[in-house]
Image: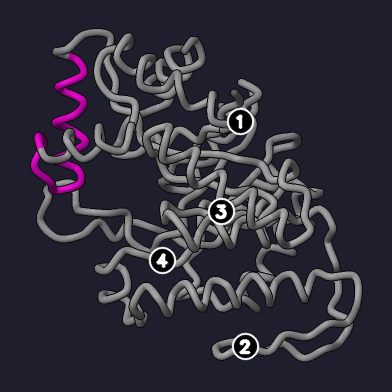
Amino acid sequence: MEFGLQTRGSYDDVLGAARWAEARRLACFALPDHYLAGRSPTGDGYDTRSADIYPYLGGLSVETTSLQLAALVSPITYRHPAALLKLGLAVDEMSAGRFTLGVGTGWMKAEHSIFGFPLPEWAERFDRLEEAFGYLRAALGAGDDGFTGSHYRLEPIDHQPKAPTLRLMIGGSGPRRTPELAGRFADEFNIYSQPAPDLAVRIGRAQEAANLAGRDANSILLSSVSPPVIGPDTATYRKRLEHLAAARGVDVDRFEEQSRAIAVPMGTHEEARDTFGPVAGVGITRYYLQILGGFGLDYAAEVLEVLGSA
């Protein structure tokens, strides 16, 4: 199992974290694409201290040398596929081929409401996601194919550059359409934390869809992501759990219950290892640690040590 790191903050914060990840030879460093950082630190309202990630990713491209970079993931609700294409190409060029463009349906209601972005129903969002990947694959293809859908259209001209190193990721937790789209289009399928049997079902559907599309199912990188909440003892774990629940403005017991239900590594070090252990057995080969809510790199190092020994 290889590990990646996903975090957020000011540019100085993310640059320091990226350099730390590169020094530790982590597989990838990812930024979440959101215009809100979640609930406010006081739990009253929303934390608006969130910059656009693509200038940050451009900066990280020239400030690192070997670390893979990723957008995990950009919502199709406020990123037109043409913008995603050009942003992805720019970051991939600046990083000398180290960038993975992740795209998803979008989900944060407050983010869309506050900034005035429409948030269609799930069915339309998945239709848009499917068309977005058809659009991106056409633009990045070897020929001069265009794309025509209900929501997006691309003229059939020879789009340049082709950027064969730009990788496409689909991220989400949906049980059916997300895996099917991943199998058809993605270089990486990122599944938000789920119990191992549910991961296995989603992976199986993605692989079946890849085979039906004439793709090599084994070429798709399978990854997962979660915000582990652990501690060397129960008291430390509980203190960290309460801190993270407060940062999200949610009830601590409900937050713990929901997190455990989807197999986020939780509890003491031993408990977290027991939860994490089955993940590799279903084919996940990369795991992104979400270190959010004010937890620092010392905590990230602790999590890596614990889960890396699972």
Q: CA distance from mark 1 to mark 3?
A: 18 Å
Q: How many marks?
A: 4
Q: Is residue 58 visible?
A: no
Q: Quadrant of residue 153?
A: bottom right
| Residue kind at label 1, given as amino acid type | Thr
Residue linked to disc 4: 106
Q: Quadrant of residue 109?
A: bottom left
Q: Position of residue 28 (x, y in %)?
A: 62, 37
Q: Which residues are magenta?
A: 236-253
> In terms of sequence position, does the residue under pointer 1 or pointer 2 come before the other?
2
* Mark closer to the observer (4, 2): 2
| Residue kind at label 3, given as amino acid type | Ala
Q: Height in image: 199 above or below 177? A: above
| Residue kind at label 4, given as amino acid type | Gly
Within 10 Å of the Cα at label 2, are there few (<14), some (14-19), or many (20+) other Cα atoms? some
Q: Height in image: 100 above or below 299? A: below
Q: Position of residue 40 (x, y in %)?
A: 19, 52
Residue linked to disc 1: 285
Q: Is residue 44 left or right of residue 262?
A: left
Q: CA distance from mark 4 to mark 1?
A: 25 Å
Task: In the rendered structure, find residue 149 and report the number of the disc placed on it.
Answer: 2
* Mark closer to the observer (1, 3): 1
**Disc 4 and disc 3 in contact, CB within 8 angstroms:** no
Of 260 and 206, nearer the camera is: 206
- What residue appears at the point 73 percent right and 41 percent down from the top-left corner? 218
- What residue appears at the point 62 percent right and 27 percent down from the top-left corner? 26
Within 10 Å of the Cα at label 1, are there few (<14), some (14-19), or many (20+) other Cα atoms? some
Question: Is residue 166 highlighted in magenta?
Answer: no
